[in-house]
Each structure stands twice: as C-alpha cells, then as structure tokens.
Image (cartoon, grey):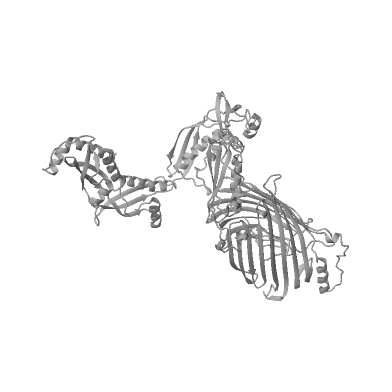
C-alpha cells in the first residue's frame, strides 16, 4: 500500500505540482514541461529526511545511477521505491521531480527512517525464560521497529502461553525513544499470563447415535479436568481443539454418518476460572454400502479386486476405510488397490472411488480404474555413499534396470539398506517417471554413518577391576588389506565384519577374533563366518577374594558357519549352519557337577548348530517399526554314549580325586541337544510409537539317562542379559528387575521361557545418535527339568528405560525395573533394580 501511495505521489508531482514544488525549493527552477513515457537521462538524486543513514547509502539502495535512461513514470523508478521498502529500513518513501534541464531530470527522495531497537526487556516472567523466549522469537537488538514487528511480537508471546493453557494471557508493548543514540528506541514487553485454564466440562447436543463418552474419547487432545489425570492435560489449545472437532466428524464417518456436521461450538466461562466446551451436532442418517462396481479393470478380475478392497454390500459406509483400501494408509505394509497396481508395473495407473448414487440410506460406489501401460525401470542409482562401495548396496536392492516397476520392491530395498547398519534409517528413494517412454529412474539417497565401533570400558565386579577393549569394523574390506591407499584409517567399504575383543581382570582373561563375509563369492547372499577365542579363568576365594592362578580353567574354541538366504517360503527366511569346537582344560579348578567336584581333566565339545529364521522387521536395525523376527534352532552333539558301549556310572567309595577323574572321563566328549524358539513382533501406533512383543523358550536335553545333563550349555536367567567372559556355551537371558543370573540354579537351568511387552518411543533418529525411551512388562523363569517346569510359574517385572545408539560406541542404555516376585529361596520381592546396557542386541 505504501509503495502504491508513493507511486501515485510521483504521478501527481510530475503532472500537477512540479512547477510549484520546484519554485518553493529553488527560485531558479524553471517550470519546463515533460512528456509522458519519454526517455530522460538521470542527472542526479538528492535525499531528505535522513537521520542515521548517509545519502550515498540510500542511493545504493535505490539501484539508480547517474546517466541512466529512465521514463517518467516508469518501471525503474517504481523498482527503486520498492527496493527502499524491501530494505526494511524506512517506514515511508516519497519521490519528487526536483528539476528538469532539457533531457536531464533530477529526483528528490524524501524518506522516513524506521527506529532501531536498542534494548529489550521482558517483564512478568523469569529472566531465564525471558531469554529463551527472545531467542525463539528471533527478537534481536538492532532490528528495525516496524508495525509488523510490533504485531508479530505481541501475537508470538500471547500464543506461546495460550498454547500452554493460559487463555487469559495479556501482552503489552511499551516503546520509548532512547536518548543515548539517534533514532533508537527501547522496548519493554509486559506479559501477564494469568492462571492456567482447565476444561471442566465438554457438553454435546444433538447426539443420539453416539454417547457423550464416545465423542469425548474421539477428542484426542482436548480432555475434561478430573483428579488423577496425569497422562493428558485438560488444557484448551485452539489448534488442537480444531483438530479434535475434525476427529469427531471422522468418528461419525467411520460409523456411516457421512452427513454428520458441527452446527456450532464455543466456550463458556465458569466462576472457578475453568471453561466449558459446548458442541452442537447434527448426526444425519447412517449409510451403508449398496453396489460396489469396478470400471476399467483389465489386469485383475472384479473378484481379485474385491479381495483387496474387503468391503461388501450391506457394510456400514466408512469413508475413511474406503479411502485407505483404495489409496493406501501410508504404511509400508499397506494392502490397497493402488499398491496392487503399482506392484504389478502400473506406475501411471489411477484408482479412484466415486459415489455415483445415494438412495435412502444406501450408497453405490464406482471404483474407476485407468490402468495405462506397464512401466519398467530404466536406471537405478545410489548417492551419498562416500565410504561404502556401490556393489555392497546394489546387491541388496530389489529393483533392477529392466524390471517392472514395483512399489513394494522399492520399500523392501529401503529395508535392506537399513539392515546393513551402515546408513541412517531415513533412506530417501526418488522416483523420476517418464510417462512418454513408460519408464522410471530410481535414485536412493543414503546418509552414511560410522561403520566401526570401539568398546573401551572399565568396571568393578567380583572383587576386581574389569577392563574391556573391543574393536568392531562392520564395513570392512579384506581385499584392500594390502592396499596402503585404502587405509583411512582402515580399509573399509565391502560390508564385511571383523571384530577383536580383549577382556581381563584378576580372575580371568579372554581374547576373541571373528570375521564374517556376508556375500561369499560376491554373487549370492550366502555368508561365511568364523571365530576363534581363548579364555583363562582363575580360582577365586569368595570369602577373601584371593586369586589362585595355579588353579585355572582354560577354554579354547573355534567355529565356522555358513548362512544362506532362502527363496521359499519367501526370501525373508535364512538357514544358518555352524560347526563349533571347544576344549575345556581344568587344572585343579573346582567345578560343581551334580553335587560332585570336577577339578582336573580335559573336556571336549564338538557341536552342530542349525537355525531357521525369518526377519521382516524394518526399516531400521535400531528402531524397527513393522514386521517380525522369529527363529527355531537346534544345537546338538553326536550321541557318543549310544554307540560306544561305555559304562558311564561312577562307583561309590571313590576318593575325591578319583571321583573327579571319573567325571572328567564321563564328560570327555560332551553330549546334549538344545532346542530353541524365539519370536518378536513390531506394531506401530505412530511413526515414533512402537510396541515390541517377544516370546521365547529354550530346552537342554540329553540322550542317555546314565550321562544326564551336560555341565555346560546351561541357561542363566535374570538381570541385564549381558554375558561377559563366559565361553562355556551358556546362554544368558535377561529378565530385568532381578539380579544377574539369580533366577537359575548356580549350575544353570535346562529349561527357560520368557515373555515381554515393550512400548518404545523414538526421540530422535539422527545419524549422530538415535535415542528412544521405553516402558516394559516382562515375565519368565528358569527350570531344572520337565518335572519342575511350569510355564505359568513366572517371575514378573515392569520398568522404564532409555536407549542411545551412537555409531562409534554401539548401543548404550539404562533401565529401572521393579521385580514383583522373590528370588529363589527368598521371601521378599526383588524390588527395584538398575541395569546398564552396553552393546546389547536391539
């Protein structure tokens, strides 16, 4: 408006008052006339009304220069005025024709400078809060004080508190000239937030089909005040309230009331400084689906389409469900007609639901389909991978050049990239369609994160200091191990895993090395892994904490395994097979076996392990939001006792040394079989809120009653679930709320089961650190044998925790858990326990 006024003033001055104005300012000026739209030479510019700015600065702002050709009036003059206003330094700009000398014009700009903010003070709230608000409002010293600045500042501070329930918040600005400098002002912001206003009652009128309770439940954000509500405040926020009004209509729509509407709504005040919300409704009639007709479908029959739509004649009309079944619900696992077509190559297809007939309470719907031609993928590219080699990503993609376009394959590719663990979970595929050629290019943009982790920690336990050094390189490249140029600091990029770990204390020392090649030969998803390890444990006196290094248990072992991704029943399945060998050498080391002491001898453990697993969880390893994981496994040794005709009984009356020797001979070659089953399911309520459900059990059996249970390979239940130095085949099963391993006998159990519900909320999924909080319920137990096994006799717990994943250090976390039941042999419940999580599986 100011620009328009200034431009009009230019016209008025040029055509009506040029002579009078010029005569007033300078008697020698002539009243020569000029022609409209004629080109003139700009002879000079003068500026009046300046306080802080120099004349040259204003001339620069205009963009005009002496000698320039201009028209009176013209675009260049209008642009100069616009630039002065856009500089946000002036509240008013007027332009006058100062003199006309033949073909040369001289202009005068009369400006009014905006005052500059020199000091800001916020009154009525804490200084720390005031500083925070000023920063959020971006209100800084040196800003030009415009009318817009005053309005936006007042509105910002008002909304800041009304959004928190302070509906009577008053904000006033007091602006005063600052005499210490030219054209500067000081601003004082007075904030009176008043008391927080609660919603006392929510009243509905006109509702018959739905109860007041059901409608209040549909309002997700706006709740009534009552004692004990802590999970959702009963404050009134206009934006959330408007969303809740839409939720009410959606609730009606889901039940077939498509004509439902809100006639009026508003708030009323109570004497106790609370408000009532009054909502008047018109429900209309309830509709049902009549005929559902398919038009334009050639690729699929009506019956095939009805199988996906899953809506029958006579069903209550639900517009939301109809939209989801036709267009999708936005989730990766959505089953809808549009996805069905896009998974079959019909990238350019269109599927729309149209109401064609409304008769009484019945609605006829046509599903109109334009299939178009199938599209193929022309080119697939990956960007953002600076360290990881292209082939590591391309071999995981489910979309290839020449393939038919498939939305599901793109989503599956996103999951596979996330499962590598080298990239941030926010993988962005960019589909570039070419309608003319019926093709599409796909570019996957990844954000690389650290592929290596370092574990350096120290702690105190068992009467001694425990130090750990671990290095894990999750994106190693062994083919470049002799290439000096590839060390930055180590050769990386081929997706191999190499880890080294050292753990030592006064009572033990452990060394381990492992390597995994996920794509053996580079052409098929078949993995090769092997590991070697060595451990020495020394006898500890539990009373004095003295360590006798002459009494030791030495363990050395190695394993080699093959894993293969299967294509049946689907390609989420994998079969893993491992052969492992361990040697246990006891040197005067007391080991309890069935009530007897085994102190000397060498035991061997040669076993075969096969696991069939299926993992469809994704897209992230750290915070899965959909899918499931399950596995069934068996680990077994050869049944030596069934074929060697050896007498495994231990005669009575033997000395301790003879008994120990007999036990060592009995278990010279360990024999056992282990069965396990585990399952996890992920259910997303929102993008950030996910429920993880877990159930698992394990059983350790034996072939021969004369041999009995193996002294190794037992289950130890309770605590954080982290195994430290034990390499005796034991499985450590976490059950928070109880001390580590305390729910199993000292020698370990032969059966366990565990059930778990864990509600997770993602705080951030940034590449530098992924953080989520959790609340959980757990139950489980350990049993000696089938005679004592009772799947309903469980130790229960509940608690909360937090997880932080940093690429360089892995997973860190802490849990606060309450055990509701006593430990074995005790009568008092376990109570509160604190568990620290380091490097645990996700």
Residue 438: horizontal and vertical position, in percent?
56, 36
Residue lying at the far top in this picture: please name it.
359
Left or right, 488 with reference to 754: left
Q: Nearer the viewer, residue 751 or 64?
A: 64
Which residue lies at the image location 67% right of the left edge and 68% below the top edge? 510
Picture mark count: 0
Residue 459, by quadrant, is bottom right
Residue 28: horizontal and vertical position, in percent?
11, 43
Residue 836: horizontal and vertical position, in percent?
60, 61
Residue 67, by quadrant, is top left
Q: Does residue 712 appear in the picture of this structure?
A: yes
Task: Check the image and report above or below for 677 versus 501.
Answer: above
Left or right, 211 with reference to 638: left
Left or right, 484 with reference to 557: left
Which residue lies at the image location 86% right of the left edge and 72% below the top edge? 653
Residue lying at the far left in this picture: please name it.
27
Q: Nearer the viewer, residue 456 or 748?
A: 456
Residue 688: horizontal and vertical position, in percent?
55, 48
Quadrant where the C terminus sits is bottom right
Q: Does residue 519 appear in the picture of this structure?
A: no
Task: Check the image and report above or below for 315 versus 187.
Answer: above
Left or right, 117 with reference to 734: left
Task: Check the image and report above or below for 168 versus 713.
Answer: above
Quadrant where the N terminus sits is top left
Q: Nearer the viewer, residue 39 or 272?
A: 39
């Amino acid at each position: 408006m100011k620009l328009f006024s200034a431009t009009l003033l230019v016209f008025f001055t040029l055509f009506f008052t040029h002579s009078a104005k010029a005569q007033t300012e300078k008697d020698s000026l002539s009243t020569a006339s000029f022609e409209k739209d004629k080109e003139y030479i700009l002879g000079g510019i003068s500026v009046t009304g300046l306080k802080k700015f120099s004349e040259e600065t204003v001339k620069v702002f205009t963009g005009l220069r002496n000698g320039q050709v201009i028209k009176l009036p013209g675009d260049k003059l209008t642009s100069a005025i616009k630039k002065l206003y856009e500089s946000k330094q002036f509240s008013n700009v007027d332009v006058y024709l100062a003199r006309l000398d033949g073909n040369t014009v001289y202009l005068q700009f009369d400006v009014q400078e905006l005052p500059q903010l020199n000091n800001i003070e916020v009154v009525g709230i804490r200084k720390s809060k005031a500083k925070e608000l000023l920063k959020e409002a971006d209100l800084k010293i040196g800003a030009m004080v415009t009318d817009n600045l005053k309005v936006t500042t007042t509105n910002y501070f008002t909304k800041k508190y009304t959004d928190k329930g302070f509906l009577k918040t008053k904000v006033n600005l007091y602006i005063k000239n600052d005499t210490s400098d030219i054209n500067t002002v000081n601003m004082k912001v007075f904030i009176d937030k008043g008391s927080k206003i609660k919603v006392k009652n929510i009243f509905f009128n006109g509702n018959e089909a739905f109860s007041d309770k059901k409608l209040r439940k549909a309002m997700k954000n706006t709740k009534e005040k009552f004692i004990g509500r802590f999970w959702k405040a009963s404050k009134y926020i206009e934006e959330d309230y408007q969303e809740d009004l839409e939720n009410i209509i959606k609730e009606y729509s889901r039940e077939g009331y498509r004509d439902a509407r809100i006639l009026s709504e508003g708030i009323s005040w109570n004497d106790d400084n609370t408000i009532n919300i009054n909502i008047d409704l018109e429900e209309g009639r309830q509709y049902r689906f009549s005929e559902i007709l398919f038009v334009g479908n050639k690729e699929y029959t009506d019956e095939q389409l009805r199988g996906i739509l899953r809506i029958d004649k006579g069903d209550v009309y639900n517009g939301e469900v109809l939209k989801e079944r036709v267009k999708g619900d936005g989730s990766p696992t959505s089953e809808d007609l549009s996805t069905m077509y896009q998974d079959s190559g019909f990238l350019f297809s269109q599927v729309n639901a149209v109401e064609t007939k409304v008769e009484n309470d019945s609605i006829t719907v046509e599903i109109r389909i334009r299939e178009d031609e199938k599209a193929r993928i022309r080119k697939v590219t990956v960007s953002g991978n600076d360290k990881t080699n292209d082939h590591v990503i391309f071999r995981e993609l489910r979309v290839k050049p020449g393939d038919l376009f498939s939305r599901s394959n793109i989503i599956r590719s996103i999951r596979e990239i996330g499962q590598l663990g080298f990239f941030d979970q926010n993988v962005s595929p960019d589909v570039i369609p070419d309608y003319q050629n019926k093709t599409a290019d796909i570019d996957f943009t990844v954000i690389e994160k650290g592929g290596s982790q370092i574990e350096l920690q120290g702690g105190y336990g068992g009467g001694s200091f425990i130090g750990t050094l671990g290095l894990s390189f999750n994106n190693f490249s062994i083919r470049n191990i002799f290439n000096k140029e590839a060390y930055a600091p180590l050769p990386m990029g081929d997706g191999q895993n190499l880890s080294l770990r050292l753990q030592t204390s006064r009572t033990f020392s452990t060394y381990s090395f492992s390597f995994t090649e996920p794509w053996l030969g580079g052409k098929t998803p078949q993995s090769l892994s092997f590991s070697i390890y060595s451990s020495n444990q020394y006898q500890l006196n539990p009373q004095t904490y003295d360590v006798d290094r002459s009494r030791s248990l030495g363990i050395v072992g190695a394993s080699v395994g093959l894993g293969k991704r299967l294509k049946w029943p689907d390609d989420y399945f994998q079969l893993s097979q491992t052969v492992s060998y361990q040697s246990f050498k006891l040197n005067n080391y007391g080991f309890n076996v069935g009530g007897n002491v085994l102190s000397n001898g060498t035991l061997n453990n040669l076993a075969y392990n096969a696991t069939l697993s299926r993992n469809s969880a994704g897209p992230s390893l750290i915070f899965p939001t959909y899918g499931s994981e399950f596995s069934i496994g068996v680990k077994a040794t050869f049944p030596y006792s069934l074929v060697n005709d050896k007498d495994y009984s231990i005669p009575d009356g033997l000395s301790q040394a003879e008994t120990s020797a007999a036990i060592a001979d009995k278990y010279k070659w360990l024999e056992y079989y282990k069965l396990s089953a585990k399952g996890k399911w992920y259910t997303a309520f929102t993008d950030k809120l996910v429920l993880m459900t877990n159930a698992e059990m394990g059983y350790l059996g034996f072939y021969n009653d004369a041999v009995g249970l193996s002294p190794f390979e037992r289950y130890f239940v309770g605590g954080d679930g982290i195994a430290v130095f034990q390499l005796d085949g034991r499985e450590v099963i976490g059950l928070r709320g109880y001390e580590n391993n305390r729910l199993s006998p000292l020698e370990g159990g032969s059966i366990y089961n565990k059930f778990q519900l864990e509600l997770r909320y993602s705080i951030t999924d940034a590449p530098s650190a992924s953080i989520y909080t959790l609340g959980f319920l757990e139950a489980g137990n350990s049993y000696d044998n089938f005679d004592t096994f009772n799947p309903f006799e469980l130790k229960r717990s509940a608690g909360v925790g937090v997880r932080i994943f940093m690429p360089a250090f892995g997973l860190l976390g802490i849990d606060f858990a309450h055990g509701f039941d006593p430990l074995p042999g005790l009568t008092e419940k376990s109570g509160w326990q604190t568990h620290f999580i380091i490097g645990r599986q996700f």
